[in-house]
Amino acid sequence: MTLIRAPELSSVAEYAYAATAPAAARLVFLAGACPLRRDGTTAAVGDHAGQAAVCMANLRAALDAAGASLQDVISTRVLVASTRRADLVTAWSVVRDAFGEHEVPSTLLGVTVLGYEDQLVEIEAVAAVTD
């Protein structure tokens, strides 16, 4: 995989602007990782950072089941149920830190509501694996 930085675009963004996958890569499309415990209850109710952390743990588990890792992710979409930019930044900070130096292209969106009761964060991802 190649992360692409566009020098003519702002360097303020904490992610690459594009990514390419090798032709032989197996693409893995992940459902939105939600802040759900194994029993189906919502974790970290009322806590954007806490829910983002649970989402990342669940994303790692789904990636592992697909034979992939965070380093294979080529795109994310982070959904945050809030009208406050600060809440979006709080969730994004957890996601960004989890990816570390692998600054995958990402979209951060504020939404009105998510699917589960008390859910504040959801993280979608696409990975490219070369077996």
Image (cartoon, rainbow, N blue to C red):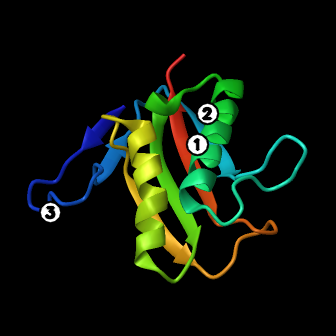
What's the CA distance linking mark 1 and mark 2?
6 Å
Q: Residue at x 29, y 40 (%)?
A: 3
**Residue 87 in the figure: left or right of residue 36:** left
Which residue is tagged 3? 9
Res 56 label: 1
Residue type, numbered disc 2:
Arg
Q: Could you tell me which quadrant the C terminus lies in?
A: top right
Tell me where residue 110 appears, x and y as whole percent: 52, 75
Tell me where residue 18 appears, x and y as whole percent: 31, 50
**Residue 96 in the figure: left or right of residue 40:** left
Which residue is tagged 2? 60
Res 115 label: none
Most extreme residue toward the left is 8
What's the CA distance linking mark 2 and mark 3?
30 Å
Q: Is residue 65 above or below residue 43?
A: above
Q: Nearer the viewer, residue 49 or 98?
A: 49
The reply to whether discs 1 and 2 touch (Cβ–Cβ < 8 Å) is yes
